[in-house]
Each structure stands twice: as C-alpha cells, then as structure tokens.
Image: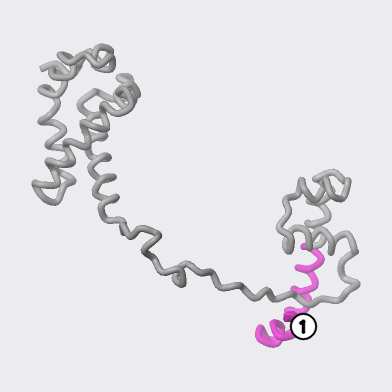
C-alpha cells in the first residue's frame, strides 16, 4: 500500500478517510506502541490514546504533519512512541491531591538572612542603596532606575562597580590568610 493518505479529507472529518487511515496505519501504531508498553493491556490503552491524540482539537496534530520532513509512516511511529511514553510517564507521577497533603508539609520555614560585614567607607551611599534595592527589596533594574530618576544603565553600572569593590575587598582578605571559618565569622553580622 502506498505511504500516503488524503490528509485534507481526513482533517475535514471525512469518515471514509478516517476509516481508511485507521485500516492502513493501525498495525503500524500498534507495533510502535508495543515497543514502549510494558504489558499487553497497556498497549491497547496506549493505541487508543494515540488515535485520540491524532484527532483531538480538530485534527490539530495531523495538520502539523510535514511531508517534506518525513514519510507519514515514520511520523506516525514517532507520534505513537512519544504519546505512549507520555502516558506511561503521567501514570507514574504521584496522584495525591494537594488537599490531602498535611499543611505542615507544605509550610516554608523562614530563612535567616546573614549580612556581610564590610567597612562603611567601602561603598558609596548610592552603591549601598542600589545593592539594597536589588538584593533586599528584590526590585528589577528598571524599577530602581525609575525610583531614582536615572537611566537603567546607570543602575547596572553602579551595581557592577559595587560588586567589583566587594570582590576586591574579600579577595584581599583571603590573600591575607584568614581561614575560611574565621573569615565567615568576621564577615557575617546577624
């Protein structure tokens, strides 16, 4: 049998075209699904899922077939295997409804924020403000620029220069030989 079918008629919902399509390609789809399915019972359900997927939403998937990229048999094999894998993967996911999960398991514990300690004169007031707005208040660069009445590039530049100063300061401290634990104790201020 030729590897073609009138997809135009099929996608218009023509029953004869659909019946011919099923007769022609059912064996191919069953074979592709069996390669993925663990049990025969799974295979039967998965074949039905493949056919449902093909005609779902007004044959949307069938309309996406591009004969210049692959033959119809190749494309259907890929669709069948992908659909089978997707269905099997969904079945493996835990299906506990969120309402059944105790609220204590969903609670988020507040995080203790530790602050770096550095000399007050290291950063300019504007650099401190920009860092505070970015990291403490979690504002976007555009929001900070609007609030300060400056160009967003100025905010990015200020942030970059502040980070360079901080990196240099902490790298210098490291070169002076403080151990990691001592540095951490010296730099963190609860």
Image quadrant occupied by the C terminus: bottom right
Name the residue located 12 percent from the left edge and 22 percent from the top edge: 24
In-front residue for pair 184/42: 42
Q: Residue at x 76, y 45 (%)?
A: 142
Residue 181 vs residue 9: left or right?
right
Query: Which of the 4 image quarters holds residue 136?
Result: bottom right
Residue at image point 27% right, 40% down: 82
Mark 1 surroundings within 10 Å by alpha-carbon count, few (fewer than 14), some (14 through 19), many (20 or more): few
| Residue found at x 22% / y 34% | 50
Q: How many marks?
A: 1
Query: Whole-percent x and y of residue 77?
Result: 21, 33
Residue designated by label 1: 176
Q: Which residues are magenta?
A: 163-190
Q: Left or right of 103: which side holds 158?
A: right
Residue 101: x and y in percent read: 39, 65
Is 136 drawn above or below residue 45 in the view shown? below
């Amino acid at each position: 049998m030729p590897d073609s079918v009138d997809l135009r008629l099929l996608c218009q919902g023509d029953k004869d075209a659909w019946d011919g399509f099923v007769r022609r390609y059912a064996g191919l789809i069953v074979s592709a699904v069996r390669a993925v399915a663990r049990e025969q019972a799974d295979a039967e359900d998965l074949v039905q899922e493949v056919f449902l997927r093909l005609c779902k939403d007004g044959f949307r998937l069938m309309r996406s077939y591009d004969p210049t990229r692959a033959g119809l048999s190749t494309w259907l094999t890929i669709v069948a295997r992908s659909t089978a894998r997707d269905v099997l993967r969904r079945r493996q996911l835990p299906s506990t409804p969120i309402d059944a999960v105790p609220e204590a398991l969903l609670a988020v514990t507040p995080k203790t924020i530790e602050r770096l300690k550095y000399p007050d004169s290291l950063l300019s007031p504007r650099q401190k403000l920009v860092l505070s707005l970015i990291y403490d208040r979690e504002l976007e660069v555009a929001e900070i620029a609007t609030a300060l009445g400056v160009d967003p590039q100025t905010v990015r530049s200020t942030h970059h220069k502040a980070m360079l100063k901080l990196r240099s300061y902490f790298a210098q401290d490291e070169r002076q030989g403080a151990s990691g634990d001592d540095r951490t104790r010296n730099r963190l201020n609860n």
